[in-house]
Image (spheres, grey):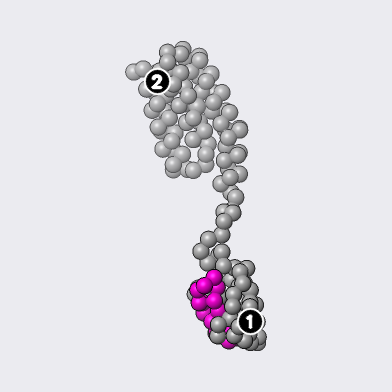
Amino acid sequence: MEPWVWWLIATGLLLVGEMLTTTLVLAMIAGGTAAATVVAAAGGGPALQFGIFAIVALGLLFVVRPIARKHRKQPPSIRTGVDALAGSDAEVVEQVTGRDGRVKIGGETWSARAIDADRVIAAGEMVRVIKIDGATALVD
């Protein structure tokens, strides 16, 4: 069997292993075997194949992997859904107490309750949405 076929098989096995582990180590090594596959298919000798494999795999492991890991751990910068409503202003439509009430947030009417159980907020006042709990806006 041709050497490039062995390199290609190794690449496939490493990628399958990466899918099972998701550590980004096997994927970086697979990049090295993929580069060696190209060199072997182009007719490069065994020393060149192993040299390219080592250079590419080590380069990916020590340069690309740390950058990729850092990006995987970053929280999403855009809040969506109900998380995006926290911190927004709302207009009280029906008196809000520590138990119930209604507010309008961005054109939609939500059930609401005051964070402070003793506070009563009259209709027409503006409040700040602290968080959304289920289908209820907690306001202050």
The answer to which quarter of the image holds residue 61 is top right
15 is within the stretch colored magenta = no
Coordinates of residue 60 in the picture (x, y in percent): 56, 31
Coordinates of residue 82 in the picture (x, y in percent): 53, 67
Residue at the limit of the structure toward the left, as seen here: 1
In the foreground, 87 or 76: 87
Q: Is residue 133 left or right of residue 20?
A: right
Q: Which residue is drawn at the image coordinates 46% and 18% (left, top)?
A: 39
Coordinates of residue 31 in the picture (x, y in percent): 49, 30
Q: Nearer the viewer, mark 2 or mark 1?
A: 1
Q: Which residues are magenta?
A: 95-112
Question: Regarding mark 1 in the picture, which secondary structure is present there?
Answer: loop
| Distance between mark 2 and mark 1 Cα atoms | 73 Å
Q: Which residue is drawn at the image coordinates 55% and 85% (left, top)?
A: 94
Category of crowding for the residue at label 1, using alpha-carbon neighbours closer than 10 angstroms: few (below 14), some (14–19), many (at least 20): some
In the foreground, 99 or 53: 99
Residue 106 higher or lower than 18, as above or below: below
Amino acid type shown at disc 2: Trp
In the foreground, 111 or 44: 111
Tag 2 and tag 1, C-beta contact below 8 Å: no
Quadrant placement of the N terminus: top left
Quadrant placement of the C terminus: bottom right
Q: Is residue 23 left or right of residue 40?
A: right
Which residue bears the numbered disc 2? Answer: 4
Q: Which residue is drawn at the image coordinates 54% and 76% (left, top)?
A: 104
Question: Regarding mark 2 in the picture, which secondary structure is present there?
Answer: helix
Residue 98 in view in this figure: no
Which residue bears the numbered disc 1? Answer: 125
Coordinates of residue 7 in the picture (x, y in percent): 42, 24
